[in-house]
Image (cartoon, rainbow, N blue to C red):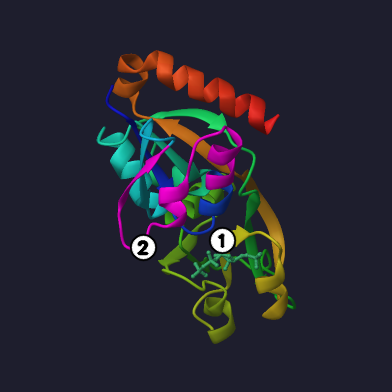
């Protein structure tokens, strides 16, 4: 039987995802010793794992070259939904928040505010919901820098421990939504490999209870 191919988000979610697979009894030695290898065998050949950047996990699953993916809800909210979201995995918990400098009254005045973010779609939707006109500037990382150097009035970003905001004299003005890691599936794979995927989902549900 062809292995089920799973795209995993490397970095922040990687450790918890591997821990989950190990809890289910699947051997993850190839991931631990991956070096520069990109396609890894997990569970002694039951799964083929690809480690990718979050947005690419969605691309691989949407195109059907990976059957399943593990990715943060933040990336899902930003990057489309042509796939099934099967399970909230419960780890990678954090929140989207609107933050700005401590002494700044964000909602004061009528002029359109400028927001820096890695998540322009999430940001636009959030302010559309408030009927507020904002200017959105896309930033690739360390978004907290933008209000400090005067590029933006505020940021919409992920807050996990809050320590990045605190260290830079910024504070949360409003929470946007909760985030955690999700198991996603390609729509065709879900039909073609229904039993195997259902078996894995069931096992995961039990493990994360
Ligand atoms: C994320 C996020 C914040 C930080 C929040 O960035 O964009 O900067 O983590 O975490 P905290 O509340 O625990 O401080 P990440 O470290 O993923 O990298 P980046 O800044 O390069 O995007």
Location of residue 190 in the rendering, given as x and y in whole percent from the top left corner: 37, 20
First in residue order: circle 1 vs circle 2: 2
Q: Which residue is mark 1?
A: 156
- Residue at 54 percent of width and 79 percent of height: 145
Residue 183 lies left or right of residue 177; in this view the side is left
Bounds of the magenta segment: 18-42
Relative depth, front residue between 185 and 127: 185
In magenta segment, residue 28? yes
Location of residue 106 in the rendering, given as x and y in whole percent from the top left corner: 66, 67
- Residue at 40 percent of width and 50 percent of height: 30
Relative depth, front residue between 119 and 48: 48
Q: Is residue 98 above or below residue 25?
A: below
Measure the C-alpha gap from mark 1 to mark 2: 35 Å
Quarter assignment of residue 192? top left
- Residue at 60 percent of width and 44 percent of height: 180
Ligand 1 closer than 8 Å to label 2 CB: no
For ligand 1, which image quadrant applies? bottom right
Location of residue 12 in the rendering, given as x and y in whole percent from the top left corner: 54, 57
Disc 1 vs disc 2: which is toward the camera?
A: 2
In magenta segment, residue 130? no
Q: Is residue 109 above or below residue 62?
A: below
- Residue at 34 percent of width and 18 percent of height: 193
Question: Looking at the image, can residue 141 be seen?
Answer: yes
Q: Which residue is mark 2?
A: 35
Q: Secondary structure at mark 1?
A: strand
Image quadrant occupied by the N terminus: top left
Ligand 1 closer than 8 Å to label 1 CB: no
């Amino acid at each position: 039987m062809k292995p089920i191919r799973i795209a995993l988000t490397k970095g922040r979610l990687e450790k918890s995802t591997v821990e989950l697979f190990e809890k289910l009894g699947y051997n993850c030695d190839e991931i631990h010793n991956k070096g520069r290898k990109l396609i890894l065998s997990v569970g002694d050949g039951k799964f083929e794992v690809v480690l990718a950047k979050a947005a690419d996990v969605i691309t691989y699953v949407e195109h059907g070259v990976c059957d399943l993916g593990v990715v943060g809800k933040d990336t899902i909210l930003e990057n489309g939904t042509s796939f099934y979201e099967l399970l909230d995995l419960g780890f990678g918990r954090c929140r989207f928040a609107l933050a700005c400098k401590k002494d700044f009254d964000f909602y004061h005045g009528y002029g359109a505010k400028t927001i820096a973010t890695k998540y322009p779609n999430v940001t636009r939707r959030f302010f559309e919901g408030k009927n507020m006109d904002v200017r959105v500037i896309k930033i690739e990382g360390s978004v907290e820098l933008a209000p400090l150097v005067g590029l933006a009035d505020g940021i919409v970003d992920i807050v996990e421990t809050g320590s990045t905001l605190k260290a830079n004299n910024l504070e949360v003005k409003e929470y946007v939504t909760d985030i955690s890691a999700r198991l996603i599936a390609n729509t065709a794979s879900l039909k073609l490999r229904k039993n195997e995927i259902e078996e894995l989902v069931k096992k995961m549900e039990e493990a994360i209870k």
